Amino acid sequence: MNAATTALLRSVLDEVCVSLSRYETGARVDVASKILEAASRGETRPERLKQIGREALSKAAITAR
């Protein structure tokens, strides 16, 4: 993975998790892993990565209840 892709993934993660506390590491890890998984399959479109991240965040919030 190159620096530009890494920067994109970090930016997407930060945007998706903007409402999360930095201490909610479990949810952040879930979101990050789904975004990374999509990127490893070749997904590089920012909007699609954000959608995947939001879906993961939603599932993490449901699981946490």
Image (cartoon, helix red, strand yellow):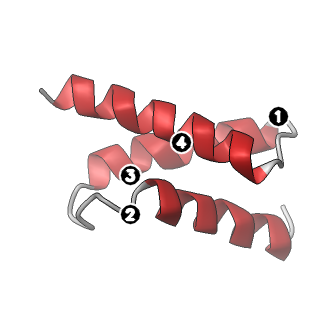
Figure quadrant of the N terminus: bottom right
User: Which residue is found at the position 23% from the left and 64% from the top?
Assistant: 21
Q: Which residue is mark 3?
A: 28
Measure the alpha-carbon separation of dots 1 and 2.
25 Å
Measure the alpha-carbon separation of dots 1 and 3.
20 Å
Q: Which residue is mark 2?
A: 18
Measure the alpha-carbon separation of dots 3 and 2.
10 Å
Q: Position of residue 42 (x, y in %)?
A: 87, 39
User: Which numbered dot is residue 53?
Assistant: 4
Residue mark closest to the camera, 3 vs 2: 2
User: Which numbered dot is residue 32?
Assistant: none
Give the side of residue 35 with respect to residue 6, left or right. left
User: Which residue is found at the position 48% from the left and 54% from the top?
Assistant: 16
Residue mark closest to the camera, 4 vs 3: 4
Identified by mark 4, the residue type is Gly
Q: Which residue is mark 1?
A: 41
Q: Position of residue 33 (x, y in %)?
A: 54, 42
